[in-house]
Image: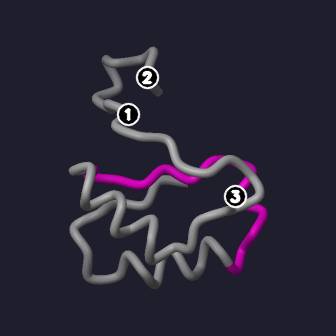
Amino acid sequence: MQRRTAAGYQVVDVVSPYPVLIEPDQLVAHAHEVGADAIVVGLEHIGDADWTRRLGWAMEGQSLTLLL
């Protein structure tokens, strides 16, 4: 993503390699702190359906986009 700036994305931070070391609500709060518009979930996290579901719930009503 960072190398393809024509796609319109600018990486502002990278959080927690697998295994997931941050709770979804903490990730949403961090995204707001750094001014992010979206949270991108990498392939290694998509396999953890419970964590991804909780992230979706934590993002509900927030001004963030979830990209899988």
Q: Residues within 10 Å of mark 3 (few under 14, many from 20)?
A: some
Number of marks in picture = 3
Q: Which residues are magenta?
A: 36-50
Amino acid type, label 3: His
Q: How far across and how far down the image is residue 53, in percent?
A: 59, 79
Numbered disc 3: secondary structure: helix
Labelled pair 3, 1 in contact (Cβ < 8 Å): no
x, y percentage for residue 11? 38, 33
Q: Nearer the viewer, residue 23 or 43?
A: 23
The question of residue 45 being in magenta is answered with yes
**Residue at image coords 65%, 75%:** 51
Rendered position, 13 above or below 58:
above
- Which amino acid type is shown beneath numbered disc 1? Val
Q: Amino acid at mark 2?
A: Gln
Residue 34's disc is none
Q: Position of residue 64 (x, y in %)?
A: 29, 63
Q: Could you tell me which secondary element the residue under label 1 belongs to?
A: loop
Residue position marked by numbered label 3 in the rendering: 45
Which mark is drawn over residue 2?
A: 2
> Residue 36 vs residue 68: left or right?
left
Report helix, strand or loop for mark 2: loop
The quarter of the picture where the C terminus appears is bottom right
Q: What residue is at 57 percent from the left and 53 percent from the top? A: 41
- Residue labelled with disc 1: 11
**Residue at the spot 21% in from the left edge and 50% down from the top edge:** 35
Residue 52 located within the stretch drawn in magenta: no
Q: Quadrant of residue 46?
A: bottom right
**Gap in angstroms between the C-alphas marked 3 and 2:** 19 Å
